[in-house]
């Protein structure tokens, strides 16, 4: 076949693949509008010969024409949904230095188990009927977070022990050795850790191969080529503005998810998609509590509109528009659970961290309101501290006994109504041992003295805000 004939054949193959991909997307829109809307709003389809099947990096969904044509429509629906789920679960933004191969494998196990349970498309299978992708009941995405699965996989990596030469009874003097390396080799000094063989490729060879069905790559905000196709593309859709940060990308998916859920609720019959389990599992903060604080204490968190709470006026006309929650806000509200579970060292560490963020200019100087609370509904004003211009108070306990989140939230609302504070967010330092009240009007960072696993049993991970474990 001549080069021209090969080019024509490739173009013909790409057109057929694009047609099949579009058919799969239409099927997804009919059966699972939540996922379909997210796909159309956030992911630009491109043709790519650099991937074995599908891939995503948060802003594009790339597909290999040969892989698309080799699978049924329903198989393509499954894999497309798989890539959407990678983004909904923020896998392109929350890896945080973990091994990319194991991270992709962990994400695949979680996603595939969810999609199989929810009957989205059809899972690709081998000739013998076994799944041709990662699926294992031990890594159930409805019960485990991606981080939990990653930790389980990572614990299985068994590096080979560095072989040592048995030292001689009387090792020769270093001055007699041909080199320092010869002397170290003779007496049996270990090879440096960085030279140890990386055995992940060897130990997870099969899993790595299966994870290539739908790869996820990190989103890089500064990468100007992130929107460029890796190969020829038939898409003429205009390029969207690149998110300037990973947090902005996550916010865009939250907005798209809300739009998709609204569309799904308007559709009658079966095929709806329930995200409650996924949202709950992925509320766990995946970074250190210090980084979690830094994320919450930004200008952006004070100014973005609340897409999760639609304007009732527009909703009556069938439009999902954000409620007015975008005014500039200033103050940090710290709520300290003084039921006896919070240690002074932990609290002072949080105060010190916020003070360092002030000094470093990473967050603007603002008021800090500290609410000391316990099990009482009515919190007296004596249990409130308000400091100005980036200063932090010295902690001293004001109360004790029991936990009452609603009392703390109500006190913050009271202080705002009196004009004493203009909140930007709530930071709740607690052992989590109380029932959760209705969601407040501001973002909540739950800083728990208990682990994610402990809180999962009771009272459960809150359905709003973000969760991080406060470990000193």
Image (tube, grey):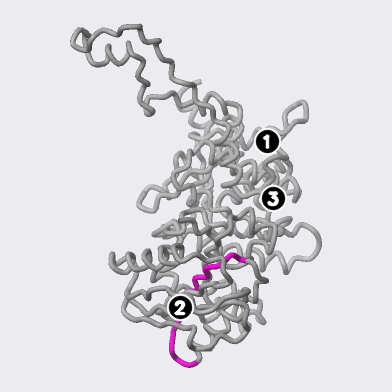
Residue under numbered circle 1: 71
**For residue 370, above or below residue 457:** below
The region drawn magenta spans 418-432
Q: What element carries label 3?
A: loop
Residue under numbered circle 3: 143
Q: Answer with mark 1 or mark 2, whichever residue precedes in sequence.
A: 1
Q: Which of marks 1 and 2 is in front?
A: 2
**For residue 424, above or below residue 218:** below
Label 1 and label 2: CA atoms lie apart by 58 Å
Q: Quadrant of residue 172?
A: top left
Residue 70 on image: x %, y %: 66, 32
Q: Nearer the viewer, residue 126 or 287?
A: 287
Q: Nearer the viewer, mark 3 or mark 1?
A: 3
Label 3 and label 1: CA atoms lie apart by 29 Å
Is residue 84 shown left or right of residue 417? right
- Inspect the magenta stretch and tell me whether residue 423 lies in it: yes
Is residue 42 shown left or right of residue 126? left
Observer able to see residue 20: no
């Amino acid at each position: 076949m001549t080069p021209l004939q090969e080019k024509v054949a490739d173009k013909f193959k790409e057109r057929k693949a694009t047609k099949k991909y579009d058919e799969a997307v239409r099927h997804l829109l009919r059966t699972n509008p939540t996922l379909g809307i997210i796909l159309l709003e956030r992911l630009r389809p491109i043709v790519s010969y650099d991937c074995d099947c599908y891939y995503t990096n948060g802003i594009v969904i790339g597909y290999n024409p040969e892989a698309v044509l080799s699978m049924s429509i329903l198989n393509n629906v499954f894999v497309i949904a798989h890539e959407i789920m990678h983004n909904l679960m923020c896998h392109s933004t929350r890896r945080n230095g973990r091994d990319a191969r194991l991270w992709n494998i962990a994400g695949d196990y979680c996603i595939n188990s969810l999609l199989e349970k929810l009957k989205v498309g059809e899972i690709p299978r081998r000739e013998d009927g076994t799944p041709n992708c990662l699926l294992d009941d031990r890594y159930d995405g409805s019960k485990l977070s991606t981080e939990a699965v990653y930790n389980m996989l990572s614990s299985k990596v068994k590096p080979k022990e560095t072989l040592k030469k048995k030292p001689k009874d009387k090792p020769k003097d270093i001055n007699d050795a041909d080199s320092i390396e010869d002397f170290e080799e003779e007496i049996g000094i270990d090879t440096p850790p960085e030279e140890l063989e990386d055995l992940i490729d060897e130990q997870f060879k099969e899993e790595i191969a299966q994870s290539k069905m739908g790869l996820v790559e990190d989103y890089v905000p500064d990468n100007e080529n992130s929107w460029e196709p890796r190969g020829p593309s038939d898409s003429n859709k205009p390029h969207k503005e690149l998110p300037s940060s990973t947090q902005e990308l996550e916010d865009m998916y939250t907005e798209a998810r809300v739009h998709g859920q609204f569309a799904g609720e308007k559709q009658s019959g079966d095929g709806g998609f329930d995200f409650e389990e996924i949202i709950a599992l992925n509320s766990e903060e995946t970074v250190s509590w210090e980084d979690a604080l830094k994320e919450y204490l930004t200008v952006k968190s004070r100014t973005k509109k609340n897409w999760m709470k639609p304007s009732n006026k527009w909703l009556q006309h069938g439009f999902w528009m954000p409620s007015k929650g975008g005014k500039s806000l200033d103050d940090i509200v710290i709520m300290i659970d003084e039921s006896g579970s919070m240690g002074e060292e932990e609290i002072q560490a949080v105060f010190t961290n916020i003070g360092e963020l002030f000094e470093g200019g990473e967050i603007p100087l603002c008021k800090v309101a500290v609410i000391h609370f316990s099990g009482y509904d009515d919190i007296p004003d004596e249990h409130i501290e308000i400091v100005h211009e980036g200063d932090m108070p010295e902690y001293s306990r004001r109360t004790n006994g029991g936990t009452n989140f609603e009392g703390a939230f109500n006190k913050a609302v009271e202080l705002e109504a009196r004009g004493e504070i203009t909140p930007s967010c709530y930071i709740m330092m607690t052992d989590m041992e109380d029932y959760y009240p209705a969601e407040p009007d501001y973002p909540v960072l739950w800083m728990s003295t208990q682990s994610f696993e402990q809180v999962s049993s009771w009272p459960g991970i809150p359905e709003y805000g973000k969760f991080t474990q406060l470990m000193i």
